[in-house]
Amino acid sequence: MQASTQHLEFNILELKFKEKLGIKKLTSDILKTLNLLDKNGDYNVAAELLSDKNNIRFAGIDIVRFGANINQILYRETIKEVSLLSQYDKAIEIFGRYYQYEEIIGYQRIKKELIPREAFREALANAIVHRIWDINSYIQISMFENKLEINSPGGLPAGMSKDEYLYSNISLLRNPIIADVFYRLDIMEKFGTGIMRINEEYANNIAKPIYDISENYIKIILPIIDIKKLDLSDGENIVLDIFKEEIELSRAELDKKTKFNKTKSIRILNSLIDKNIIEKLGNGPGTTYKLIEG
């Protein structure tokens, strides 16, 4: 599909290719190689999305930072009408503002992360590359004290199951031209390893990423990696310590160890499930619970 205008500039794209690949100039031949320019010399929609002034409606990122609850908005910015590459860079910058900090240890300043930068980078790239562009919705990034959510418009590509998306390296590209540019710039992998790389960043963390997939959106929830900031109750910490020692427990077995009543145990178990710390196995009388493995 052709771009809405043929008067496009690519200063950002050219700069990125100069820095990463050492090219001197972004020529028409290179644009054709990238499939941004067809044989008739016309730009397509992918070219417009990557151009300096991207005028495609809703082709942007809406970032909101919340306070104690969703009614308290501390910061909001909608990144739009610029190249997808500029959107990516700006979102990374805002992420660093709120989820990275320096800690002075002795005479050194040590950089710390509340959420792994690489996990956010992978999730963001996936959201940009795999979204559906004809849905009237921005990519939404919701920042909370204990987690970050990235909501990408559009479900899985046709022919891909949820299990294939989560557990295999199968890559069905919805936007192959944009994906190829991101791959050449080393922003993302081409072979469907994004989810695996996100999970690797949380391998040694109690809370794990959550993947909420529907027909209309894909939401990736990244919890903070500082257990002290997960805001666990005393009861949740007691149950968590027990599960660190036990492979798998029923609710009744947990009651015996904690001396909690049934109602309190169920409330704590459901809370830890919501925080993606433990998982529920089975149904009915045989239901058991265990820590989610990294």
Image (tube, rainbow, N blue to C red):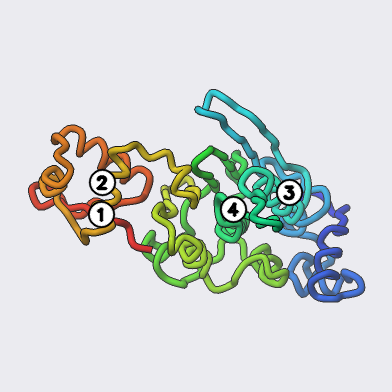
Kindly state the secondary structure of the residue where label 3 is placed: helix
From what the image shows, is residue 73 above or below residue 221?
above
Report, in whole angstroms, how far the alpha carbon at label 4 lies from the one at label 1: 26 Å
Whether residue 162 is visible, yes or no, is yes
Of all residues, the one furthest to the top in this rendering is 71
Label 3 or label 1, whichever lies nearer to me, is 1
Regarding mark 4 in the picture, which secondary structure is present there? Answer: strand
Q: Residue tagged by mark 1? A: 243
Q: In the rendering, at what x and y percent does residue 128 appear?
A: 62, 54
Which of the pair 56/193 is nearer the observer?
A: 193
Q: Which residue is mark 2?
A: 239
Q: Amino acid at mark 4?
A: Glu
- The type of residue carrying mark 1 is Phe
Q: Secondary structure at mark 2?
A: helix
Residue appearing at x 32%, y 44% in the figure: 237
Q: Position of residue 130 (x, y in %)?
A: 57, 57
Q: Are marks 2 and 1 in contact (CB under 8 Å)?
A: yes
Position of residue 194 relative to residue 268, above or below, is below
Which quadrant would residue 168 be assigned to in this image? bottom left
Residue 78, image x, y percentages: 70, 37
Q: Reading the chain from its start, which is encountered first: label 4 or label 2?
A: 4
Marks 2 and 3, the one that precedes in the sequence: 3
Q: Position of residue 24 (x, y in %)?
A: 91, 74
Q: State how far apart marks 2 and 1 are (Cα).
A: 6 Å
Splitting the image into 4 quarters, where does residue 138 fall? Answer: top right
What label sits on residue 90 in the rendered view? 3
For mark 4, what is the residue? 113
Q: Are circles 2 and 3 on residues that touch, CB within 8 Å? A: no
Task: Mark 3 or mark 1: name the one nearer the start of the chain.
Answer: 3
